[in-house]
Image (tube, helix red, strand yellow):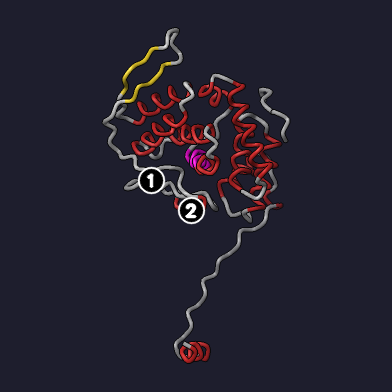
Amino acid sequence: MVGLATGLGGYNGFGGIGIPGVGLGYGGYGAYGPYGYNSGYSNTYSSPYIVQNPTSTQAETYVSTPTTSDEFLEAGKASFLAGDYANAQRHAQHAVVESPQNAKAHELMLLSMFAQGEFQGAASAAHAVADLGQVPDWTTVYGYYKDRDKYVQHLTKLQQFVKEHPDMPEGRFLLGFNYQMIGEKDKAEKQFAQYLKEVRGDDPIAVKLFSGLGGDVSTLPMPETHVPVKALDDTSPAATEDRANY
């Protein structure tokens, strides 16, 4: 752990990815909505963006027209480092369209939405990251920020959101995910446990994360089994009564 704690102490529900024409296989996310891929951005990327290069000793401005997933990711990282999180998200969207199985593209989406306070979408992206790859560690996260205090500001906003909305499961999942990223494993396990109670254990990705942190899956509620209602036979008394009352 790197001393990031500020002292504030799926798939069930996290919306489908929804990129038109790109099947990502995350249809089980459910009710919390897509994380921005149906927002009108197309696979073509003809308009160049002006990108600031914050790593230069001078504020070098250049015109970049990304065309591949890796190029979109590099442009997105540059935008993120410059604090332009909305533009970083746009680049991440394009990177996912170009390479939907690239965990790094979803990772950039996760952090871009998290930085903007779009916690519902960030939780969806976090599911994709965990499903396609490993949970990023602090070294990886710091590589996007290069600024510990800025990350702590964003984390504090999420902690406050969970405090004010304890019944919104996306906040708890995302907080647990962030705690795991920064090495606060006990806190991560606690948040995942609470989240899984709220969703009745119906999230295999969260169960895997919880278990990987040493959580006892036997303490989790069992997912509800949805048994389809058998159609009434037209000759049954109930069906006859229904027709009579229609």
Separation of disc 1 and disc 2 at Cα?
Answer: 17 Å
Using the image, tell me which numbered label, if any, was put on residue 120. none
- The front one of 126 and 165 is 165
Q: Residue at x 69, y 23 (%)?
A: 3
Mark with earlier residue (1, 2): 2
The x and y percentages for residue 22 are 34, 46
- The front one of 101 and 82 is 82
The x and y percentages for residue 125 are 49, 40
The x and y percentages for residue 133 are 49, 36
Q: Which residue is mark 2?
A: 28
Is residue 127 located in the magenta-colored stretch of the structure?
yes
Residue type indicated by callout 2: Gly
Quadrant assignment, res 37: top left
Residue range of the region highlighted in magenta in the rendering:
125-132
Q: Which residue is mark 1?
A: 38
Residue type indicated by callout 1: Asn
